[in-house]
Amino acid sequence: MTTDPAPLLAAVEGLRASADDVRLPLELDGVEQARTSRRELVQQLDDYVLPRLRSLDAPLLAVVGGSTGAGKSTIVNSVVGEHVTRTGVIRPTTRASVLVHHEEDTRWFTDKRVLPELARVVGDDAEDDPSAVRLVTSDTLPSGLALLDAPDIDSVVQANRFLSKQLLSAADLWLFVTTAARYADAVPWDLLREASERGTSVAVVLNRVPPEALTQVRLHLASMLREQGLGKAPIFVIDEAELEDGMIPARSIERLSGWLQSLAGDARARSVVIRRTLTGTLGSLSQRAHALAEEGRGQVAAAGALATAPDTAYRDALAGVTEGIDDGSLLRGEVLARWQELVGTGEFFRSIEAGIGRFRDRVGAWFTGKEVSSEPLGEALQSGAAALITSHGQVAASTAARAWKNAPGGAPLMAEHPELSKASTGFGEKVERLIRDWQKDIFEMVRDEAGSRRSTARYLAFGVNGLGVLLMIVVFHATAFIPTGAEVAVGAGTAALAQRLLEAVFGDQAVRSMAVKARAALITRVEELYDQERARYDEALAERPVDATAITALEAAARRVEETR
């Protein structure tokens, strides 16, 4: 660690802010562990690293932790020489944390220098409140050292377990208390392994050891500590003895008490312990931050895939509608039947089959008759177009929903928003309104284009609605502008005939221009409607926002800490 803590402090403050900005909202594999790691990183920065960097000369905080029934509170009372924390046979006994310190050190702990999230109280009011730390002063505990009695690390109460781990992460020194019967339990060794990886200073208190098992247990415990990289951790053995007024006899506790007293009285020794733990913790920050960033990148990738799936589904739907408009498929079935009713099924179509070129000579006779009703044909065209748009929209919704269900993080979103598995409520009505509005656009286009032609026989023969329907037929077949031969398909012939009729009124170029505009207007309206449908997925995803810039900022902050320390 550098001699000047100011640059390092600034870098760590930046890391803390960046880590706090990272969110892991999507339910990916392993996300709960990642969220826990993030919370623990931020908590340790708040509870220990930043306070210690700001006050390197503050008292050494020794946290007394261990398994249920190990005798932690009894040891604290025995070291202090008075009952400062509650003991008992009912588990869990310690529900809130108890911090014992000399009166001269009060200022270091009342201002929330460490553990800022925990309320400060005095007396017995907070003994059952895990959100508070009870401050107790003692003249027998030397200035420069504070003992914090933590809840059980394997408590049946989840809040106690979380608090215990939080307190241990705030320690300059961890006094790990175990017994001859329980020193090999798995839970405390998981924490000891973590303490070793982060360079935390650890001392082990082996409590209630029968004399006949002392050598064997101590040797085995020392071997286990070496395997975890804690071979230099001091071991204090407290033999099995009757308590005196609820405390361990002085002869049994004197070695541990003496070591703590000497540590409190030796500023240099305290500094060594503090700096060892701080240096080790600082060394772990970069790896932990980069691991968090890696989880964040997974979230960004998952969010991107979730955003892409509806985009692709509705883009394909729009392409399907466009193809359906262009390929003449709408000019079949009911539409074709209504068209034949309009123009006459027999002689008229036979003339088309015989040769489309002969049709031009008959156009004049066509326009001399009375106005023809195009309403049935218009309705058939509307129904066909609406069915095309509705069908592709429904397929897009089911496709997007299926993609989300199979994508990382998507299934929980679908469970929260089951309505996304199908088109929105009233989608069919929206499509029908779209077609009606588009048809109004076409009629207005016909009126504008007609101009002075409105009084001509050709115009009057069909009227605005009839000419608009003819224009719809032309739009619904892209090959209408390709010269047709005698073997043209019926659908294409229908579009070609409609085009010739329109050209007789407006001229070739005007018809082409109107058809292009009408087609573009329809596709634009469909695209807007599909965008509204797709936006439902965007809104659902926005409820769990993933910020890629926060991930980048975290990685940069981690590099600054590594470079500064």
Image (cartoon, grey):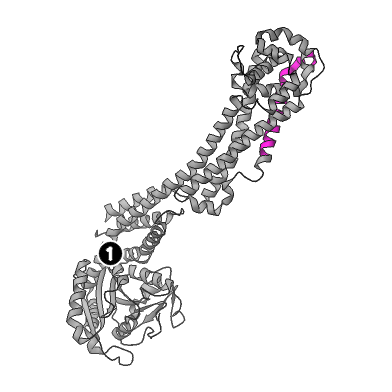
**Is residue 379 visible from the viewing direction of this image?**
yes
Q: Main secondary structure of the magenta part?
A: helix
Amino acid, disc 1: Leu
Q: Quadrant of residue 109?
A: bottom left
563 to the left or right of 549: left
Q: Could you tell me residue 497's position as x and y percent?
A: 68, 16
**Is residue 534 visible from the viewing direction of this image?**
no
Circle 1: element type:
helix
The reply to whether the magenta stretch includes residue 455 is yes
Which one is in front, 344 or 227?
344
Which one is in front, 335 or 67?
335
Q: Could you tell me residue 17's position as x and y percent?
A: 40, 56
Q: How many marks?
A: 1
In the picture, which quadrant includes the N terminus? bottom left
- In the depicted structure, whether residue 377 falls above or below residue 289: above
Q: Which residue is mark 1?
A: 278
| Range of residues picked out in magenta | 430-457
